[in-house]
């Protein structure tokens, strides 16, 4: 079992990076303090080293149980005397054993560890001084035994009761109040009774050392793993060795001691989970691009273990779910069948994690369940249904808030529910993760343990430094774009909405690398132009002006003063011509060919589709749903934003790739989702304005479709198209479009879902705050 408080990111395949535009950005980089740069480089080196070694804290509790194993040759002597010596040499100054610098709410954990160590020393008649100090610690903290405010380790009442009985057998007088002993014993009996009348014996087997000779050890051994352990737990395995002298148990303990020295951790092995946690951290903090080689190496190793059915993955729910999600999101072919046993909540409740209501584990399953790529993936659909209900109930009832040791988990769960994968903007999510980040890597199973691979200050330092550096670059880019709007006189067009900040935000939120300036600029400029042109076709231009603009784009090389029928057309065409030409020139460096003609054609197709809609409105024509959607996915205006940007993110795109069915489907699916999301949110307003959209056309199909039925139908189409898109993005086999380019389509889809989650695109105060947080407000470590 792994107590899971994980972090994940959405989709993040490796991205080739283009050279940044130079408009003052270099000076911003150079102005960064030398201290910050040195700290960042130091953090990178230490993080890179962590991939090579998983750090696990040693467990006094588990080492004590190993030290209690008698020698098979001489039962009056310890089998692992060096572990016994380790206990005597690793007592804390206050007389306790356990984690150093422990959280104030982990007194129960310290009591279990201290009592286990005292029993080991007493059993072999050594360490009288350490025993006395240990008993003094127990006496001074005995009130915590029944303190519900303290964090309770898994199986606390069973383990403590068992060790109290063991102390009696050793004639060891424990300084515990009889009332407290009775209370723990009562809770233990209730717990055992509840387990025996409900789920299988997995939970009792995990805490079997607390059951002693009353445990059914032969039954417990059915949980023995290939490595010889029980639940990868040295304490449980040591207790089994004591009772059964099982050779495989002995081999496991010897192998762990060989790796760690004279003491053992509370869980081993944990390499796969710990390294996946690292990837999770790095991706969610937005710093994974610094460690691409290391990440690919870990993922390849994890995939090999997945194909081989390694127990380290599949015997732990959190590891299974995390491995599935991260591998699938990186394009590895993994089946959701691995999660089939958790498709029903009842099945999950019959697991160890289910019994202890591990919300972190449920959160991992919930995140994995969002990677549905087929409508017939019943497994993930079912998991998504019950896990979201479980997590919402936990937030509503306050169960997660009540655990102050893991108070951040409730914030993480709330964030995951509010921002599902398909609406989670990468850089906005990075900032939220940074602000919620908890650098304390302490996890608690039967006892507390730590691993710097889970989370640490280096992750946070690098993330804050990286975010602020990227933000400084974005601020310079935004200033440049503001000058561009004025230079092109777009601000003189009174009919046009001025949405530069939002257009640039959508680029900066998804194309975060400092080296992707040209891609962000292209995305933002075309976003501004499509907004202005949309308003021009809606309200700003006459029929003559609309037709004139289209003819100018077709002709391309024109005399502005002679061929433009109005100043408005002249401003628009001039801005279009210069922007398209600029993108074409920039793209030559990366593509080795001129793509200006293709970019112009993308714009022409958009203008012609907008003219069709303008004609429908003018003539009060009612197209069929199919006619509307065939035109509408183009008129939604994503083409000029996304498609030219593909030429500026690194990979070369041949004409064959651009003309491929895969490329077309990626664009069609993204644009269809956008068109329908827009229509869902805006149909009431547009109906009042006399405009048709997908929802109203569903209601006019002659079958008596109600507004509710129409919106549900459209919502279902959005879900199906989104899943089709995700499948295309993740698909590696027979794919001709580079993953870096496919990610842009998914990024745009997340932008659309983010903007249209609650309203008609640009009106939410929360979204305004997100724009400011990303572009205007640097992060300071002192605030975290």
Image (spheres, rainbow, N blue to C red):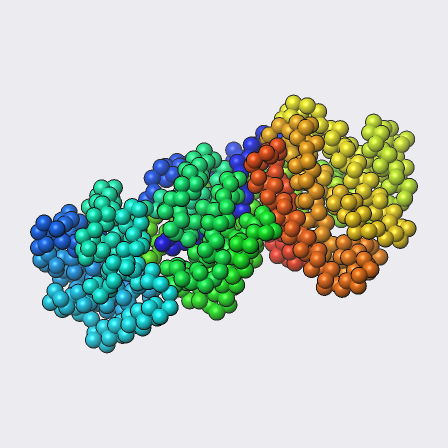
Residue at 21 percent of width and 74 percent of height: 177
Task: Pick out the residue farthest to the bottom.
Answer: 179
Residue 407: quarter of image: bottom left
**Observer able to see residue 18:** yes
Q: Quadrant of the N terminus?
A: bottom left
Spot occupied by residue 389 in the image (x, y as percentages of width and height):
52, 63
- Label tally: 0
Give the camera-side residue of 321 and 556.
321
Residue 21: quarter of image: top right
**Observer able to see residue 527:** no
Spot occupied by residue 105 in the image (x, y as percentages of width and height):
33, 63
Give the camera-side residue of 24 and 88.
88
Spot occupied by residue 372 in the image (x, y as percentages of width and height):
56, 50
Residue 166: quarter of image: bottom left
Whether residue 393 is situated above or below residue 87 in the rendered picture: below
Residue at 53 percent of width and 39 percent of height: 331
Residue at 30 percent of width and 58 percent of height: 206
| Residue 380 left/right relative to 113 | right
Whether residue 31 is situated above or below residue 236 in the rendered picture: above
Spot occupied by residue 103 in the image (x, y as percentages of width and height):
33, 59
Residue at 44 percent of width and 60 percent of height: 347
| Residue 68 left/right relative to 660 | left
Give the camera-side residue of 94 and 27.
94
């Amino acid at each position: 079992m792994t107590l899971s408080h994980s972090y994940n990111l959405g989709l993040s395949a490796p991205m080739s990076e283009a050279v940044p535009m130079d408009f003052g950005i270099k000076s911003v980089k150079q102005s960064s303090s030398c201290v910050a740069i040195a700290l960042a480089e130091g953090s990178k080196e230490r993080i890179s080293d962590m991939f090579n070694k998983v750090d696990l804290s040693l467990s006094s509790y588990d080492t004590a149980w190993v030290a209690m194993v008698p020698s098979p040759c001489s039962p009056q002597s310890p089998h692992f005397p060096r572990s016994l010596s380790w206990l005597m040499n690793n007592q804390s100054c206050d007389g306790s054993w356990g984690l150093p610098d422990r959280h104030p709410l982990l007194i129960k954990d310290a009591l279990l560890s201290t009592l286990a160590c005292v029993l080991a020393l007493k059993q072999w008649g050594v360490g009288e001084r350490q025993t006395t100090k240990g008993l003094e610690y127990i006496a001074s903290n005995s009130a915590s035994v029944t303190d519900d405010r303290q964090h309770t380790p898994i199986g606390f009442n069973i383990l403590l009761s068992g060790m109290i009985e063991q102390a009696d057998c050793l004639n060891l007088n424990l300084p515990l109040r009889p009332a407290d002993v009775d209370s723990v014993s009562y809770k233990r009996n209730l717990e055992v009774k509840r387990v025996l009348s409900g789920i299988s014996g997995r939970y009792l087997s995990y805490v079997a050392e607390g059951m002693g000779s009353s445990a059914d050890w032969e039954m417990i051994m059915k949980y023995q793993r290939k490595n010889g352990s029980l639940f990868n737990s040295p304490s449980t395995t040591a207790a089994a060795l004591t009772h059964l002298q099982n050779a495989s148990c002995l081999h496991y303990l010897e192998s762990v001691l060989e790796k760690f020295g004279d003491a053992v951790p509370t869980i081993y092995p944990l390499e796969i989970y710990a390294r996946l946690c690292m990837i999770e951290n790095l991706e969610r903090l937005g710093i994974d691009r610094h460690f691409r080689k290391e990440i690919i190496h870990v993922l390849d190793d994890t995939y090999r273990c997945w194909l081989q059915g390694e127990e380290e993955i599949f015997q732990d729910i959190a590891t299974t779910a995390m491995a599935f999600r991260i591998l699938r999101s990186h394009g590895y072919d993994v089946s959701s069948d691995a999660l089939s046993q958790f498709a029903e909540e009842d099945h999950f409740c019959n697991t160890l994690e289910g019994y202890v209501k591990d919300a972190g584990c449920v959160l991992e399953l919930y995140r994995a369940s969002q990677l549905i790529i087929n409508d017939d993936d019943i497994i993930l659909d079912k998991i998504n249904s019950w896990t979201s209900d479980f997590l919402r109930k936990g937030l509503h009832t306050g169960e997660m808030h009540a655990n102050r040791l893991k108070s951040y988990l409730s914030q993480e769960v709330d964030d995951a529910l509010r921002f599902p994968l398909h609406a989670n903007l990468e850089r906005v999510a990075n900032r939220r993760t940074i602000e919620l980040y908890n650098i304390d890597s302490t996890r608690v199973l039967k006892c507390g343990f730590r691993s710097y691979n889970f989370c640490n200050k280096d992750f946070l330092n690098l993330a804050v430094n990286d975010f602020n550096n990227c933000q400084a670059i974005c601020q310079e880019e935004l200033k440049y774009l503001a000058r561009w709007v004025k230079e092109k006189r777009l601000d003189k067009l009174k009919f046009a909405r001025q949405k530069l900040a939002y257009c640039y935000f959508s680029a900066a939120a998804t194309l975060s690398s400092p080296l992707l300036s040209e891609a962000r600029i292209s995305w933002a400029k075309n976003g501004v132009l499509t907004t202005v042109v949309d308003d021009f076709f809606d309200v700003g231009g006459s029929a003559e002006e609309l037709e004139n603009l289209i003819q100018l784009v077709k002709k391309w090389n024109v005399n502005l003063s002679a061929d433009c029928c109005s100043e408005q057309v002249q401003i628009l065409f001039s801005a279009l011509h210069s922007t398209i030409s600029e993108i074409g020139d920039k793209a030559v460096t990366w593509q080795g060919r001129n793509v200006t003609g293709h970019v112009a054609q993308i714009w022409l197709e958009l203008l012609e589709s907008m003219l069709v809609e303008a004609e429908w409105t003018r003539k009060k024509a009612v197209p069929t749903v199919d006619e509307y959607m065939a035109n509408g996915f183009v008129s939604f205006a994503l083409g000029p934003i996304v498609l030219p940007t593909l030429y500026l993110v690194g990979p070369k795109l041949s004409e064959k790739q651009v003309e491929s069915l895969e490329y077309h489907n990626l664009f069609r699916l993204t644009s269809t989702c956008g068109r329908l999301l827009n229509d869902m949110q805006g149909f009431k307003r547009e109906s009042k304005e006399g405009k048709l959209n997908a929802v109203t056309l569903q209601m006019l199909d002659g079958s008596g479709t109600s507004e509710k039925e129409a919106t549900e139908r459209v919502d279902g189409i959005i879900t199906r198209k989104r899943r089709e898109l995700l499948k295309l993005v993740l698909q590696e086999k027979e794919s001709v479009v580079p993953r870096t380019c496919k990610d842009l389509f998914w990024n745009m889809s997340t932008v659309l879902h983010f903007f249209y989650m609650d309203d008609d695109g640009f009106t939410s105060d929360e979204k305004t705050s997100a724009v400011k947080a990303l572009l205007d407000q640097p992060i300071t470590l002192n605030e975290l």
